[in-house]
Image (cartoon, grey):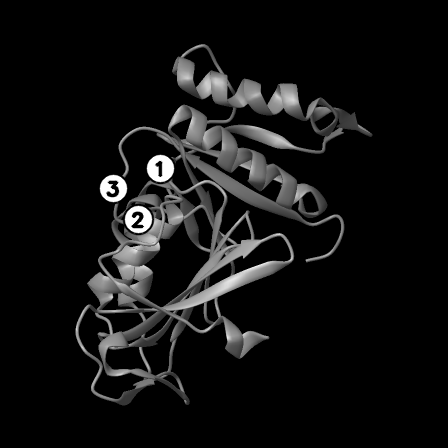
């Protein structure tokens, strides 16, 4: 897109499925209904409060420019509203929408990335799945579904959760066989660990990825449920669980 282009960000009020695939179908059905053109007194209070947040935060973007509104915010169909904005302001407006969504319990749909940003998403966490756009503030279910979508047969086979602190957790593999690593940063230094089950290692094994493989100890081959549990702890800012062994591999990065 170029300057002067517009993009849309959708706000989903009311009852939408917590399953992104189902919510996407619901969205596609509702969005073709006849639109509502203007704000009016019949809108629920939470919708008006959500709109007010944008008007107060970005008053200059709502100012008329040569008789044309630079930014449109209003109802589209039942339970769905749209923010149509200049592409050069899309990133800051999408960020504010996610913040406001968490505050008011509103789901934000970004059709550019095809992501639903849920109000229970983990603040300060960014999820990157191989060959996909960065997903800001995923929730537990979205992390779980991303892990279960991983496959060595064409990918995606890598997933990273980045925290604002600089710490990160990463997963490689797919098809039910994974390895998981965590890095904790302290100033200019860091420590890096590989997670494993509390069983004795009997040698090394290969975890297949999309066109490659990762070599780990035999007890470090984890299931989707295992790595989802580790990622969920990480996203919540919890310490590394003692349910797992943690092999320190920091020296490999120095």
Taking the image as drawn, is residue 175 in sight?
A: yes
Q: Residue at x 18, y 78 (%)?
A: 200
| Distance Cα–Cα, label 3 vs label 1 | 14 Å
Q: Nearer the viewer, mark 2 or mark 3?
A: 2
Q: Earlier in the sequence, mark 2 or mark 3?
A: 3
Q: Quadrant of the C terminus?
A: bottom right
Residue designated by label 3: 17
Q: Determine contact: label 3, label 1, CB under 8 Å.
A: no
**Farthest-out residue, top:** 41
Residue designated by label 1: 120
Above or below, 194 relative to 138: below
Q: Quadrant of the N terminus?
A: bottom right
Crowding near pointer 1: few (<14 within 10 Å), some, many (20+)? some
Q: Which mark is residue 62?
A: none
Taking the image as drawn, is residue 75 in sight?
A: no
Q: Secondary structure at mark 1?
A: loop
Q: Residue at x 63, y 45 (%)?
A: 91
Q: Position of residue 216 (x, y in %)?
A: 33, 82
């Amino acid at each position: 897109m170029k300057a002067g282009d517009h993009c849309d960000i959708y706000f989903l009020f009311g009852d939408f499925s917590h399953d992104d695939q189902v919510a996407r179908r619901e969205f596609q059905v509702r969005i073709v209904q006849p639109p509502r053109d203007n704000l009016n007194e019949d809108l629920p209070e939470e919708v008006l409060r959500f709109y007010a947040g944008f008007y107060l935060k970005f008053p200059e973007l709502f100012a008329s420019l040569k008789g044309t509104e630079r930014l449109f915010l209003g109802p589209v169909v039942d339970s769905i509203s749209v923010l149509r904005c200049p592409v050069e302001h899309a990133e800051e407006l999408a960020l504010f929408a996610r913040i406001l969504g968490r505050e008011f319990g509103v789901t934000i749909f970004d059709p550019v990335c095809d992501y639903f940003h849920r109000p229970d998403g983990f603040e300060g966490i960014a999820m990157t799945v191989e060959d996909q756009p960065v997903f800001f503030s995923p929730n537990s279910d979205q992390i779980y579904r991303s892990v279960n979508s991983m496959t060595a047969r064409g990918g995606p086979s890598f997933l990273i959760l980045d925290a604002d602190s600089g710490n990160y957790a990463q997963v490689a593999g797919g098809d039910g066989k994974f390895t998981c690593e965590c890095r904790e940063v302290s100033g200019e230094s860091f420590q890096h660990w590989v997670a494993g089950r509390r069983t004795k290692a009997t040698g090394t094994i290969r975890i297949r990825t999309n066109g490659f493989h990762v070599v780990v100890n035999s007890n470090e081959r984890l299931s989707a449920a295992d790595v989802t549990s580790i990622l969920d702890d990480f996203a919540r800012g919890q310490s590394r669980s003692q349910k797992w062994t943690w092999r320190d591999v920091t020296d490999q990065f120095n």
